[in-house]
Image (tube, rainbow, N blue to C red):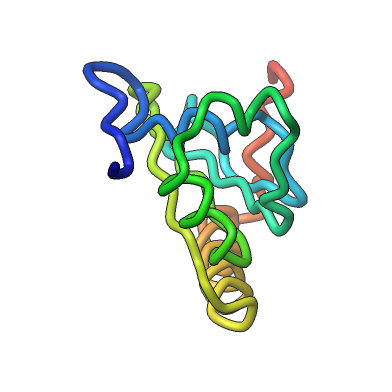
Amino acid sequence: MAIRRYGPGKYDTILDSVVDNGEFDESVGEVEYDTFYGLITDLELDDADRAELNAEEIAYLKRQRGAIVHENSQGFVYIDYYTSKAVLKKAWSQIEADDAGNYEDGDDGDDDGY
């Protein structure tokens, strides 16, 4: 068995489609403007999610300590998985810093219609 490809669509793998459930510990960015990023620090699966995955995908996920979801303006989703909480935290800090740099002029990116 192997980690299965999702096929044509927004995800690379079946695993990615299960992990991206819309529940994030933190998030930055917006797909309308560029890229949305979501931080996941708990990759626990419920029974329904586990039923969608094969043994290799479940074993792979158990080795991971977190993930960062990237969704671009085209709707494609990419997920980076991390086996180290420290490396995950460093990667997330860099994304936050890059995102904050997008709004240095005082605009927080919120288009309130004015």
Total marks drawn?
A: 0
Q: Relative to the observer, which residue lies in front, 99 or 37?
A: 37
Vertical relation: 40 (above or below) 71: below
Vertical relation: 27 (above or below) 95: above
Vertical relation: 66 (above or below) 78: below
How far across and how far down the image is residue 27, in percent?
67, 47
How far across and how far down the image is residue 66, in percent?
61, 61
| Figure quadrant of the N terminus | top left
Name which residue lies at 45% across and 36% down: 54
Q: Relative to the observer, which residue lies in front, 110 or 75?
A: 75
How far across and how far down the image is residue 77, in percent?
41, 33
Left or right side of 45 for 78: left
Left or right side of 84 for 56: left
- Residue farthest bottom in this picture: 86
Quarter holding residue 104:
bottom right
| Figure quadrant of the C terminus | top right
Q: Relative to the observer, which residue lies in front, 90 or 16?
A: 16
Quarter holding residue 72:
top left
Name which residue lies at 73% across and 22% down: 112
- Residue farthest left in this picture: 8
